[in-house]
Amino acid sequence: MPIICEPDEGAARRLAVGFREHGHAVKDLETLERTLAARPDELIVVFGPGAPLEGVLAFAAGRRIDRPVLGVVLVRTVLEVNTLAQAMRAGIREVVPDRDFPALMEACKRCWEVSARLRATEQAQPSEGAPEPGRDGKVVVLFAGKGGCGKSMLSTNLAVALAGRGREVCLVDLDLAFGDVGIMLQLSPQRTIVDAVPMGGHLDQTGIRSMLARHESGACAVLAPVAPGDAEKITGRLVTDLLAVLRRMFDVVVVDTPSQFSEPVLAALDAADRHLLLVGPEVTALKALRVTLDMLDLLGYPASTRQVVLNRADARAGLSRSDIDRVAGRPIGVRVPSSPDVPASINKGVPLAMAHPGHQVSRAVQEVADLVLEEDRRTAGRGRRRGGLRRAKAGRS
């Protein structure tokens, strides 16, 4: 039962009707604070269109710290960009237009789901005085110098496979212009990585949880933007901050990337404990792999963080294993076989690793999962700076 804070009695009644009169209405923030103190299990507060914005923002910012399980939904007569930005910075989870009851119900449903998960996590933590330390998860970046090598296919299947092993997994779609993770997992992009932009340098677990999409496998995802031009809003600094928080929330963070060394991709490579480099059995893909390896060397990333994965390994392309191993400079880590079931599974939006765990492709994905979960020294993964070229460029600018 949400608490509705709205000074106008007519508007308050109208909102209560939307909740089938199960909402408890209060007129002002002072009364709201007293009500919340008496109802410690309350999970949602809805501020009506007449609630003063400045007071709402201050309330939300305060509760984000001292009562993070409480979700705040803001109803506005006019949705302005500046208001949305202020709301996100303050920790308000949802902003919806007035008189759109279906949108309000959906917003409250999403808000309740986040609050319920936060409450469950809070109750599972040790008692006061013995706080549970944050996770120290791994960040794994999938990269290929040439498009079409199957990064998104492998990243989605890998995330599902890891979740199937009982790991807490988050998949981040950093292909900001043409990300396919959402469609491959049938996840609706109600929230995307763009929702982190207004949070600026104040990213925290509460804010990030509000933008996660959850897959039926148990894996979570941060989806790519859907609007043209939104990709440009994602900076390398934002990616660095995002992955730093996600690392504390999940056992494994899998990052799907585009085939370019952009600032967001470089930030992800910096944060990663392991780089999975994909290649196909074509001469052009091998050339791109060679260029990628040279670039990673030039940027100062240790070779020990890399594993090369050959996708469509048994395709009849006329290249031998020794050809591919020679270009990679080491034996291929995992060979994922070619199968017509792969595009079929993509079209269905159900990863093979979940639909057919015994499939030869699924077994290969499990081998990749073995690589990811293997204990490693991590000496190069944290706080590492890019070498050579990046610093040389910075010095010349």
Image: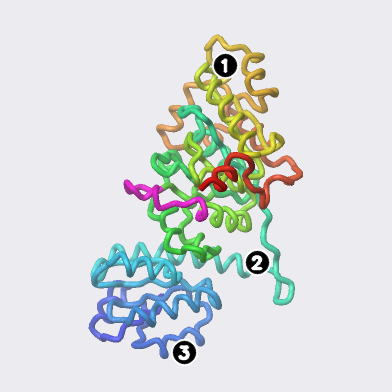
What x and y, as percent, mark residue 384?
A: 66, 48
Q: Which residue is mark 3?
A: 34
Q: Residues within 10 Å of mark 3 (few under 14, many from 20)?
A: few
**For this view, does 291 lie left or right of residue 302?**
left
The disc label shown at residue 343, or none: none
Query: From which residue to which does the magenta span run?
Result: 225-238
Give the label, 2 or 3, closer to the camera: 3
| Residue at the image point whose x is 35% and y is 47% from the top | 226
**In which image quadrant can residue 158 be found?**
top right
SS for dot 3: helix
What x and y, as percent, mark residue 262?
A: 48, 42
The disc label shown at residue 124, or none: 2
**For this view, does 98 lie left or right of residue 369?**
left
Q: Mark 1 to mark 2: distance in Å?
A: 47 Å
Q: Which residue is mark 1?
A: 314
Question: What's under tag 3, amino acid-wise?
Answer: Arg
What x and y, as percent, mark residue 175?
A: 45, 41
Quadrant assignment for the N terminus: bottom left
SS for dot 1: loop
Residue 206 vertical position relative to residue 350 in the rendered view, above or below:
below
Labels 1 & 2 near each other (Cβ < 8 A): no
